[in-house]
Amino acid sequence: MTPPEQRDVALELEKLRGTVEAGFARLDGRLDLALQRTEQTEGELARLGERVAALEQRVWAASGVATALGAAIGYALQIIT
């Protein structure tokens, strides 16, 4: 038969083990949620990057057209006057 102190220690260790396991389970859940959010954010950033690249191409094309048009109008005005 085990002395009372050893039984008390064993009982406390079992409680501590349960507490630690519950804590790890909570941490696992939080890490899973953080990973899911990170993956969603990475996907959103990739989509936004694609949209920005498309907008930049449109702006560069529009600025090129505007520059050419401005030069043509300036040249035409010089000829007319």
Image (cartoon, rainbow, N blue to C red):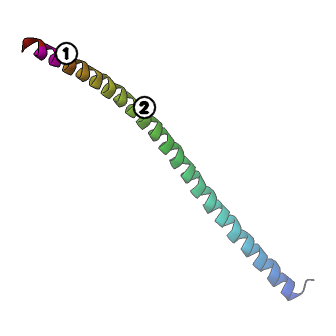
Left or right relative to 45: residue 33: right
Residue 54 covered by magenta stretch? no
Image point (48%, 38%), residue name: 43
- In the picture of the structure, the residue carrying the numbered disc 1 is 72
Instruction: State the image quarter where residue 9 is shown.
Output: bottom right
Distance of mark 1 from mark 2, alpha carbons? 33 Å
Q: Position of residue 63 (x, y in %)?
A: 28, 25
Q: Which residue is mark 2?
A: 50
Q: Earlier in the sequence, mark 1 or mark 2?
A: 2
The residue located at (11%, 16%) in the rendering is 77
Task: Give x and y (percent) for residue 35.
Answer: 57, 49
Residue 70 left/right relative to 27 = left
Quick one: label 2, few (<14), some, or many (20+) residues within 10 Å? few
Q: Is residue 35 above or below residue 81?
A: below
Tell me which amino acid carries mark 1: Ala
Eyeballing the image, is 45 above or below 71?
A: below
Amino acid carrying mark 2 in the image:
Glu
Where is residue 44, by image quadrant? top left
Main SS of the magenta segment?
A: helix
Is residue 59 toward the left or the right of residue 26 in the image?
left
Q: Where, quadrant-wise, is the C terminus in this rendering?
A: top left
Q: Secondary structure at mark 2?
A: helix
- Please give the label number shown on residue 61: none
Helix, strand or loop status at disc 1: helix
- What's drawn in magenta, residue-wise? 72-78
* Image position, residue 12 (x, y; %): 76, 79
Tags 1 and 2 touching, CB below 8 Å: no
Foreground residue among 5 and 74: 74
Foreground pick, 2 / 68: 68
Between 6 and 43, the one nearer to me in the picture: 43
Residue in view at x 72 percent, y 75 percent: 15
